[in-house]
Image: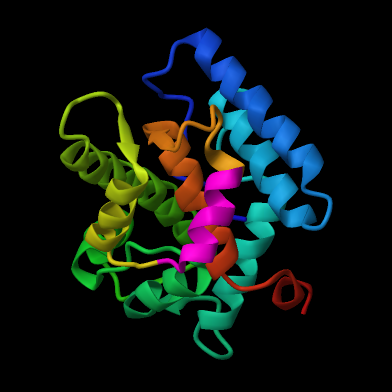
Amino acid sequence: MLATPFSSESRLDKGQRGLFARFLTVRAEKSHVDPDMAELLENIAARVEGRSDGFSPKELQRLDTAFGRFKIPGESDLYVTDIPDLLNYLGYVLTNEEQVMQVVREVTAYDYMDWDEFVSFMERYIQFERGEFRRVFEEFDIDNSGTISLKELRELTKALGFVPLRQMVDEALEIVDADGDGTLNFEEACTFLAVYQHNEGFTRHEVAE
């Protein structure tokens, strides 16, 4: 799975980040049927504790696969107008062309982008995604409690432009709801989004190809 909208910058204190990271590590160890999910949770845990930054080798491999699929035939570049479709292919949900192009223009003024520029774009895009997710999260956290309910989560996903299946929501909540109280704080909500991207993005079989 690609780098998530999670970063070491967090409103949780150091002790809470450690507890949440350990929770994710335990979840990863129990994800025997899905090695990719286990790796995703381990990567998130490392970012929560500030032990990792940027893309892992596996994440770079996924990026390279997607870049190769969308680049201009016979060339080493891709058209920037294809980036929203590329993001959708990877499982990202914030793929509005106008917003994506704003991030693109922070990297290049041209109509095409090479591999190094693409990696730079993705680093910026992930920060953009986190900022948008924070903004929408706070809109639905009406009582400023720092958490949202399951009902609010469904409304939040609609506001972000996607409606996951109920089964997918239940499975993701089982993974990310650390205290099992049926509500999500921002970090848990970011992990929920990462799990959704993992399930909706292209498959491990396609990566192998």
Give the tally of numbered discs: 0
Q: State whether residue 49 appears in this view.
A: no
Image coordinates of residue 129 in percent, x first then y, are 34, 49
Q: In this picture, is 27 found above or below 192?
A: above
Q: Residue at x 40, y 78 (%)?
A: 85
Q: Quadrant of residue 206?
A: bottom right
Image coordinates of residue 182 in percent, x first then y, are 44, 38
Q: Is residue 96 left or right of residue 59?
A: left
- In the picture, the quarter occupied by the N terminus is bottom right
- In the picture, the quarter occupied by the C terminus is bottom right
Q: Quadrant of residue 19?
A: top right
Query: Of residues 104 and 40, which is closer to you in this image?
Result: 40
Segment colored magenta? 164-174
Q: Is residue 19 left or right of residue 12?
A: right
Q: Residue at x 52, y 68 (%)?
A: 90
- What secondary structure prevails in the magenta region? helix
Q: State whether residue 204 appears in this view.
A: yes
Q: Is residue 189 left or right of residue 156?
A: right
Q: Is residue 106 left or right of residue 113?
A: left
Color encoding of the figure:
rainbow
Q: Is residue 173 magenta?
A: yes
Query: Of residues 46 and 62, which is closer to you in this image?
Result: 46
Image coordinates of residue 32 in percent, x first then y, are 84, 50
Q: In this picture, is 114 found above or below 3?
A: below
